[in-house]
Amino acid sequence: MTEPNSDIQTKYKATNPAVSQSPSNILLRFRRPLIVLAHLVVFAVSLILSFLVASNMQIRAEWLIGQYPTLLIFVLVIKTAVFGLFKQYRGWWRYVGISDLTGIVRASLVSTMLVFGLWVAGLYFNSVRKSIPNVFDVSQAVFMVDMFCTVLLLAGLRMAIRLYYEEFRTVESGRLKRFLIVGAGNTGESLLREIHRMSVAEYEMVGFIDDDPAKQGIRIHDVPVLGTVEQLAEICTEKNIEEVAIAMPSATAQQRRRVVQVCQGTKVRFRTVPSMTDIASGKFRVSQIRDVDINDLLGREAIQLDTNSIETFIKGKTILVTGAGGSIGSEMCRQICHFGPKLLLLVEQAENPLFYIERELREKFPDITMTAAVCDITDQSRVEGIFEKYRPEVIIHAAAHKHVPLMEGNPGEAIKNNVVGSRTVADAADKFGAGSFVMISTDKAVNPTSIMGSSKRVAELYVQDLNRTSKTHFVTVRFGNVLGSEGSVVPIFKKQIAQGGPLTVTHPDMKRYFMTIPEASQLVLQAASMGKGGEIFVLDMGEPVKIVDLATELITLSGFRPGEDIEITFTGLRPGEKLFEELSIKGEDMQETRHPKIGIWKNIPMDRDRLRAKIAELVALAKIGEHAAIAAKIKELVPEYIGGNGNKTS
């Protein structure tokens, strides 16, 4: 059994006395008493300074021997109690700020008022009794000066501690990187302060960049605002900047993209701060900067989900996900776990991806019951055995062959997995009374030019037809490319950059829609929760992105110069590829839903007998694997399919 971290640390300290008895650890151990002692010293010094000021800096026996010691007793007792009530002994002085200063002022004001009140009471008592020495005959100026001295001395002491840690305790880690911050607002200022607090210096602060005209030429903590974003490339070259931090957590992807695009041709590394949500929640600090990722440049505004409907759709139910080890399938599992399913069934043919996703989910979601099943979805007896044993209520069908050129060379396998596999899982859902079946499709099923895209379209036709007579609600969700999925363009480009290039792009005009994996998965669940059966939902993919621009930005993000350090070469369209994918939630063939990012494609279903007969013929041809025959049969099922010549360019 693994020992808790605290026990391990205790044993380590016990066996390493030098660690537990180091000066820093001793200070931490007695930190609270030392802070109280420091306050007591400040209170005593402040009071004697106030007497000196009230006496024109003259030391006189009448106040030094009589008034000062008597008043000091009241001051120490009252101020110690009041400053404790105001939690002034709990601060971490190396991070002192404005809030600490206001706390000192409030505590000093309240304690001074109490001390002054006791002094007035003492004067009155002394005037009545006459028997007590005149120790209360103290100038009122003493109390006012004492309050200001207390504030100044305590604030000065804390600032001295902070200065010590930020300046004198800072150790340089070799040569400092020349650093520039884009964004001279609150986040940029906070980032600068936290960089100054680092115990090991890594950066040489050169300046800020900001588009606000009012900030041009000003200095923030003695660091100048050097110019605007349009001047960024020139400033980076002139100042030999090595790293640029984008300190705009609320900036849109387009704004971040503009910063990167302006810097093309400069060899700088791009960094960014955590999101405003993470900073506000305390999950991350501003100083925890990270590399700018391509998701930061292509991502979109956060999706507004109807979480109540998704929770109703998932919570307390047995959910089965096919292709659970893939990019989309694994993210679907992560998203599903957030909504508390009764049981999550992970179905996957490849054992290693299944092993890793099951292990990850069990660590992140220990309260979720889950089962991993190695299964080929074309194996009818195995699929039905799983359905009979677990009786899943919701099926998310993400398993598919997705690589266009690879499927052009292996058309029989595309039909086998995408058509036969989908049919097998859909039939099992119908046979065993599942409540909902969600098939994940692709934009390549729209006017397909590839075997892969057309095979997904045939699968769409089958599940949509099955919905007409089944108690199960069958829906389909279409979307385009997802960033970072296995085998997609971004991981390929990153690998080519790591190898020194070149980056291979098929055509300078090639465009694709992109969506992050979490965004796609969330919208799939949202669409699924809205489905009544028979719909083909289409996700809003935003604006298409030119692949050559994506390659250029990835090179720039990696700190290289496109065309100089790393080349981009064009290889020509591959079999089955289009220049432009077709996916829109606007148009006569689309109808709106209550969610602005989801539409429903209107289509005319095919006669069942004809559909199933043609699919049976297609499956028979797939066993032979002859491309021309398979393409011809697909055209009978999907008239809009352009096969054979394969390379539709628009």
Image: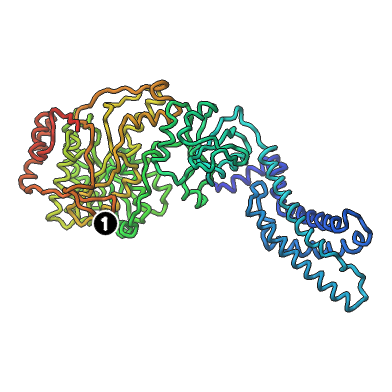
In the picture, measured across the screen, residue 489 lies left or right of residue 75, that is left
Q: Secondary structure at mark 1?
A: loop
Q: Residue at x 92, y 76 (%)?
A: 130
Q: Residue at x 24, y 24 (%)?
A: 572
The x and y percentages for residue 220 are 59, 41
Label 1 crowd (10 A; few <14 / some 14-19 / many >=20): few
The x and y percentages for residue 386 are 24, 49
The x and y percentages for residue 22 are 71, 41
Identify the residue position indicated by label 1 in the image.
Answer: 594
In the picture, measured across the screen, residue 614 lies left or right of residue 585, that is left
In the picture, measured across the screen, residue 620 lies left or right of residue 289, that is left
Q: Looking at this view, is 97 or 9 the one in front?
A: 97
Q: Picture quarter containing residue 19?
A: top right
The tally of labels here is 1
Residue farthest to the front, as pictured? 213
> Above or below — where is 155 with respect to 557?
below
**Colour mode?**
rainbow
Residue type (three-letter) at the residue carrying disc 1: Arg
> Above or below — where is 242 with respect to 609?
above
> Above or below — where is 420 with respect to 629?
below
Q: Picture quarter containing residue 139?
A: bottom right
> Above or below — where is 584 with respect to 100?
above
Q: Picture quarter containing residue 508?
A: top left
The x and y percentages for residue 537 are 22, 49
Residue farthest to the bottom, as pictured? 128
Q: Is residue 202 at all visible to an observer of this figure?
A: no
Q: Is residue 535 at all visible to an observer of this figure?
A: yes
Q: Looking at this view, is 191 or 443 the one in front?
A: 191
Q: Looking at this view, is 573 or 238 the one in front?
A: 238
What quarter of the picture does the C terminus occupy?
A: top left
Q: Residue at x 47, y 29 (%)?
A: 233
